[in-house]
Image (cartoon, helix red, strand yellow):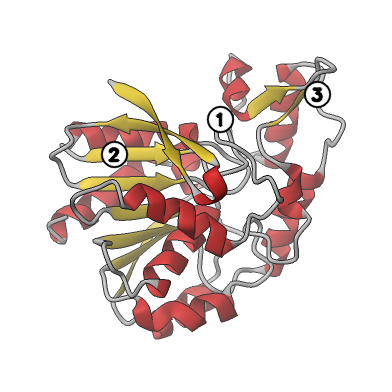
């Protein structure tokens, strides 16, 4: 069982989270990628709770049920401040598990604070130097369909076109968690379009190399990268550069998975995550 909780982030933006597991268990915070919501972690959330962890999975500002930035600011420092507000409510250092935008947020905060109050980092398919073609593909999808969709089936068609390797769900109603209904009755993706209007956007990142390099010396905790072997965002060269940046980096390859590792191969992802947590006694 999980419960819904609200946190107050930077500039009083309300952040909505699912909370599960015993409060005395080791804490794990799940940070979704840009354009997603906390519900993308459902399988991992349940597996972590079953393993005895205290789990927090929240909608980033501008996403899902959380509030939107009143000034349209979605830069990493602001996202990191939101994350810090959640960490400040915990009594023990959490493990931060982030996908794409969430990974960048977690890494930036850990480095900027010299890992204070953080137990470990798990980066899901993100390295400092991402492949531009893959980033362009994400951006094109997120900017597509500004007119929205008449039905959830239309939205499902768009997702299937973007993920041709995934089988189409028999019932697309679950996609409603990623959609909001506008005043005109049409359905729109459940995130603030202003996120894409800034040069220093968090998703897809134009270039994280300089920003991550600037804080890397503050990373003193265990770090694992879980990447999909079919990812168009993370390359072998990008992983090699990341290894040079962080000597303690562990890497787990999930065979057949793309950039959306958790959605493509949840069981393999959970196995790698739980093994990392157990080996590091987290």
The quarter of the image holding the N terminus is top left
Which residue is labeled 3 in the image? 149
Q: Say above or below: 227 vs 222.
A: above
Left or right: residue 36 compared with residue 80 = right
Q: What residue does disc 1 label?
A: 65
Secondary structure of the residue carrying numbered label 2: strand
Residue 192 appears in the rendering: yes
Between discs 2 and 1, the one toward the N terminus: 2
Q: How far apart are marks 2 and 1 (CA)?
A: 18 Å
**Dividing the picture into quarters, in which one does residue 270 lie?**
top left
Which residue in the protein does label 2 denote? 55
The C terminus: image quadrant: bottom left
Local packing at callout 3 (Cα closer than 10 Å; few below 14, some 14-19, many 20+) is: some
Q: What element carries label 3?
A: loop
Name the one closer to the observer, 84 or 181: 84
Which picture quadrant has residue 64? top right
Real-space Cα distance between discs 1 and 3?
19 Å
**Are the residues flagged by discs 2 and 1 in contact, CB closer than 8 Å?**
no
Where residue 78 appears, as percent x and y from the top left, is 55, 58
Q: Residue at x 55, y 52 (%)?
A: 259
SS for dot 1: loop
Residue 243: x %, y % from top left: 40, 79
Distance CA(mark 3)–CA(mark 2): 33 Å
In terms of depth relative to the viewer, which is nearer, 89 or 200?
89
């Amino acid at each position: 069982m999980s419960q819904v909780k609200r946190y107050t982030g930077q500039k009083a933006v309300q952040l909505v989270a699912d909370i599960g597991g015993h409060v005395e268990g080791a804490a794990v915070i799940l940070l979704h990628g840009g354009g997603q919501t906390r519900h993308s972690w459902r399988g991992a959330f349940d597996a972590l709770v079953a393993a005895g962890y205290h789990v927090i999975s929240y909608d980033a500002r501008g996403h899902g049920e959380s509030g939107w930035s009143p000034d349209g600011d979605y830069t990493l420092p602001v996202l990191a401040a939101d994350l810090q507000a959640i960490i400040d409510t915990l009594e023990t250092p959490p493990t931060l598990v982030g996908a794409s935008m969430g990974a960048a947020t977690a890494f930036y905060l850990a480095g900027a604070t010299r890992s204070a109050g953080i137990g470990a980092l798990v980066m899901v398919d993100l390295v400092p130097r991402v492949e531009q073609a893959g980033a362009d593909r994400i951006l094109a999808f997120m900017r597509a369909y500004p007119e929205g969709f008449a039905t959830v089936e239309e939205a499902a068609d768009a997702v299937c076109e973007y993920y041709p390797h995934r089988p189409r769900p028999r019932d697309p109603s679950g996609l409603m968690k990623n959609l909001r209904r506008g005043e005109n009755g049409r359905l729109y993706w459940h995130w603030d379009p202003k996120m894409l209007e800034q040069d220093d956007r968090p998703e897809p990142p134009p270039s994280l190399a300089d920003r991550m390099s600037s804080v890397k010396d503050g990373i003193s905790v265990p770090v694992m990268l879980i990447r999909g072997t079919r990812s168009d965002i993370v390359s072998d060269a990008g992983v090699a550069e990341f290894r040079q940046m962080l000597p303690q980096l562990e890497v787990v390859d999930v065979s057949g998975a793309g950039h959306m590792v958790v959605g493509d191969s949840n069981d393999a992802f959970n196995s790698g995550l739980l093994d990392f947590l157990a080996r590091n006694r987290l």
